Amino acid sequence: MVRIRVKVRPASALEYLHHDCETPVVHCDIKPSNVLLDEEMSAHLTNFGLARILLKNSPNAHFSSSLGLKGSIGYMAPEYSTGAGVSTRGDVYSFGIDVVEDELKQKEWQPAYDDGIGRMLEIGFMCASKLPEERPTMTEVSVMIKIVKASLSK
C-alpha cells in the first residue's frame, strides 16, 4: 500500500504541471531518484533542471531543444531519440517506466494475491506505450492510481 501511496503524489504533481498550470510544464526527467520521500513517506517530485515550458499556440504543444537528449537513459520516451519535441506524453512514458520498474521489484507478489501490483503494472505498461498517442494523460493516470489505492484501503 505504501508503494501505491508513494505514486499518487508524483502523479498528481505531473497532472498539475501538465494540465493545471497556466503554461504547461514538462519535467523531462522522471525517474526514481527524482522522487524523494520525507519522514512520513510522502513523495516529492524534485530536480526540475531539464523542465520545459510548453508553447501554448503550437498545434502539438511542444518545445524542441537543440541541447540533445531530454532525460535519463532508460526513462526517456522513445520518440525523443528521433528528434521529436518535448511533450507531456514523454513524462507519462517515463512515469510508466518508473512504475513498472518499482512494481517488478516486489518479489513477494504472487499472481493469486493482488495487492495492487498487477493493476499498477497495467497502468505502467499503458504509460510506457511506444506510441505517444496511445499513452494516457497524467490526469487519467492519476485517477487510475487513486482508484487502485482506494480499492486497497477497503
Image (cartoon, rainbow, N blue to C red):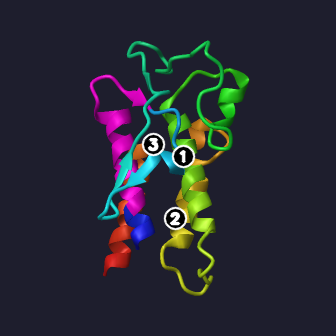
Does the segment drawn in magenta span residue 24?
yes
Give x and y (percent) for residue 17: 35, 35
Magenta highlight range: 6-26
- Please give the label number shown on residue 31: 1
The residue that disc 2 covers is 120
In which quadrant is the N terminus drawn? bottom left
Q: Secondary structure at mark 1?
A: loop
Residue type of the residue flagged with mark 1: Lys
Q: Residue at x 56, y 71 (%)?
A: 118
Work out whether mark 3 precedes mark 2 in sequence or the reverse, and give the earlier one. Answer: 2
Work out whether mark 3 precedes mark 1 in sequence or the reverse, and give the earlier one. Answer: 1
Label 3 – label 1 distance at C-alpha: 18 Å
Q: Secondary structure at mark 3?
A: loop
Secondary structure mostly seen in the magenta stretch:
helix
Q: Residue at x 48, y 73 (%)?
A: 116
Q: Which quadrant would residue 125 be assigned to in this image?
A: bottom right
- The mark lying in front, picked from 3 and 1, is 1
Q: Residue at x 31, y 62 (%)?
A: 39
* Rendered view: 2 above or below 31: below
* Rendered view: 90 above or below 85: below
Q: Which quadrant would residue 150 be assigned to in this image?
A: bottom left
Name the residue furthest bottom: 112
Does the segment drawn in magenta span residue 53?
no
- Please give the label number shown on residue 137: 3
Give x and y (percent) for residue 19: 34, 35
